[in-house]
């Protein structure tokens, strides 16, 4: 790491846990800009809570992707459709 990168890291604003949680999806989708990405990784490197959350979150995403389509329970489908119908959204 060169001196400019070290200085950038030193003066980079520190993320809070709430900030890190807000960025987690974009981080995993690789959609953060370079500075935000570095701030996110710096926070996760120091914060055990966010590191664990990131690990669980990415494991869950991987599981969902590897399982392909997951069938929703019929009760959930019905209650969701009822919810949408009650609000005038949908085909009926
Ligand atoms: Zn944190």
Image (cartoon, rainbow, N blue to C red):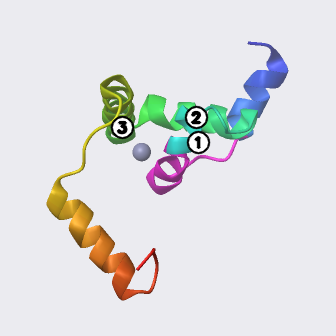
The residue positioned 38% from the left and 77% from the top of the image is 84
Cβ atoms at labels 2 and 1 below 8 Å apart: yes
| Mark 2–mark 3 distance (CA, rounded to whole Å) | 12 Å
Tag 3 near tag 1, CB within 8 Å:
no
Q: Is residue 58 above or below residue 17?
A: above
Gap between marks 2 and 1, in whole Å?
5 Å
Q: Which residue is mark 2?
A: 29
Circle 1 is placed at which residue position?
A: 26
**Most foreground residue, 42 or 61:** 61
Q: Quadrant of the C terminus?
A: bottom left
x, y percent for residue 70: 28, 38
Q: Is residue 85 above or below residue 5?
A: below
Residue 50 badge: none
Question: Farthest residue in the top direction?
Answer: 1
Q: Quadrant of residue 88?
A: bottom left
Within the magenta stretch, is there residue 18?
yes
Residue found 32% across the figure and 78% down from its top:
83
Choose the circle earlier in sequence order: 3 or 1: 1
Residue 85 placement (x, y as % from top left): 36, 81
Residue 1 lies in quadrant: top right
Of residues 56 and 85, the one nearer the viewer is 85
Residue assigned mark 3: 57
């Amino acid at each position: 790491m060169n001196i400019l990168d070290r200085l950038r890291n030193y003066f980079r604003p520190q993320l809070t846990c709430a900030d890190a949680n807000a960025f987690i999806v974009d981080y995993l989708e690789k959609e953060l800009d370079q500075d935000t990405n570095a701030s996110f990784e710096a926070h996760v490197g120091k914060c055990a809570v966010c590191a664990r959350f990131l690990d669980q979150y990415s494991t869950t995403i991987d599981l969902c992707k590897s399982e392909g389509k997951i069938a929703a329970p019929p009760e959930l489908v019905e209650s969701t459709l009822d919810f949408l119908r009650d609000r005038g959204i949908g085909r009926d």
